[in-house]
Image (spheres, rainbow, N blue to C red):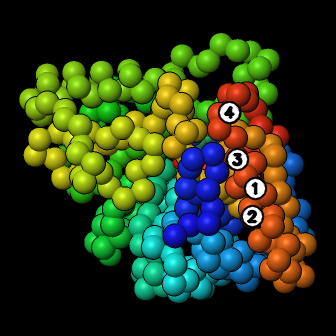
Amino acid sequence: MSNLASKGRTIDYLRISLTDRCDLRCVYCMGVDGIENKIDRDSVLSLEEIAQFARLACAEGIKHIRLTGGEPLVRLGIVGLVGQLSKIPQLEDLSMTSNGQLFSKYAEDLKIAGLSRITFSLDSTDANTYRKLTRGGSLEKVFAAIDQALSLGFSPVKINVLAYQLTENDLLEFIHLMKEKPIHIRFIEYMPIGHMGREVRKNPTPPKSLLSMDQIYDSINRLSLTKGFGELRSLKTEEVPLGHGPATSYTLDGSQGSFGLIGVHSQNFCKDCNRLRLTADGKIRSCLFSDLEIPVGAELRANDEGSLRTSLFQAVSSKPLSYAQQQGTKRAMSAIGG
Ligand code: SAM
Ligand code: SF4
């Protein structure tokens, strides 16, 4: 039973950003010098404060927690935090989104500590393009991370593909990957938030390389038919992998994996949104696109459970039913927790 409900929606999913720092500098997420308006180190929640917030949120109805950032694996003590969170009795599912660069260092310990599933971000299957998009990332490390996660039994293993600079060749590679491995690929529409939103407002012509979810569907459909991979079919509800969120999901006959399309602009998914976010500096955000934030750092430091609970309910009740497609939140994606 959840006590967290807002305008007909049950809120049972919490994304926790552990840090706004990252070992990569993806062009759509950060400037070349990293994050603008870096979170001051003194205001970053301690791991104990994060765990305390999570325990209270789970007691009120949160069942799924995703750890994100910035890059969650650059946060010292990550394995210990996973261990603390996985012991929360009401928590059904603990996942993480990572760029995969540091995964091999922590993979086994994360599994033992109780992380159940993992999503890797991978926006290009070409090593050069990937390196340029991420300003220095290694494609080889992401592929190694995917294989290691599968062999350790993380389930499901997912890949987030931001449709920022996708080519037909990438789509073909992703079809092969889906055929050969039980992975779930989520194509995500680019959202102009943070500094990118402000740039879009100055120059409202979107980059030509952006693909819509309809274009991706049409290309995969055409490629799979012309290359003899068979027809796309929609996944039945019971086949949809855990945590697929607001995606429409498909597979190809004979494939071990599947793919989903997350169209933020093309579909209004607010009415089904079950999420809250906790930023690394202790602010509850009830909507990715809204700058309305409820601070809980002081309550956590004072161990004031009553005020903390009040703030949690306040955040839930202020969750908007539809966003005005704000072009540019004050924070960048890495500081909100993507
Ligand atoms: N560093 C980790 C990673 O990249 O997986 C976790 C944090 S990252 C902010 C989480 C997700 O947000 C990534 O899959 C990334 O592609 C996505 N993301 C970042 N900026 C975005 C934007 N402007 N629009 C849509 N998705 C974005
Ligand atoms: Fe880092 Fe993830 Fe942002 Fe890329 S998308 S810069 S990996 S936080």
Q: Secondary structure at mark 4?
A: loop
Mark sitting earlier along the chain (4/2): 2
- Label 2 and label 3: CA atoms lie apart by 11 Å
What residue is at 27 percent from the left and 48 percent from the top?
237
Circles 2 and 1, Cβ within 8 Å, touching? The answer is: yes
Which residue lies under the disc numbered 2? 312
What residue is at 68 percent from the left and 66 percent from the top?
18
The numbered disc on residue 323 is: 4
Query: Visible in this render: residue 15?
Result: no
The numbered disc on residue 315 is: 1
**Which residue type does callout 4 highlight?**
Tyr
- Label 4 and label 3: CA atoms lie apart by 10 Å
Residue neighbourhood size for the residue with mark 1, other residues' Cα within 10 Å, grouped as few (<14), some (14–19), many (≥20):
many
- Label 4 and label 2: CA atoms lie apart by 20 Å
Rendered view: 205 above or below 69: above
Q: Secondary structure at mark 3?
A: loop
Within the image, what quadrant is residue 157 found in? bottom left
Within the image, what quadrant is residue 140 found in? bottom left
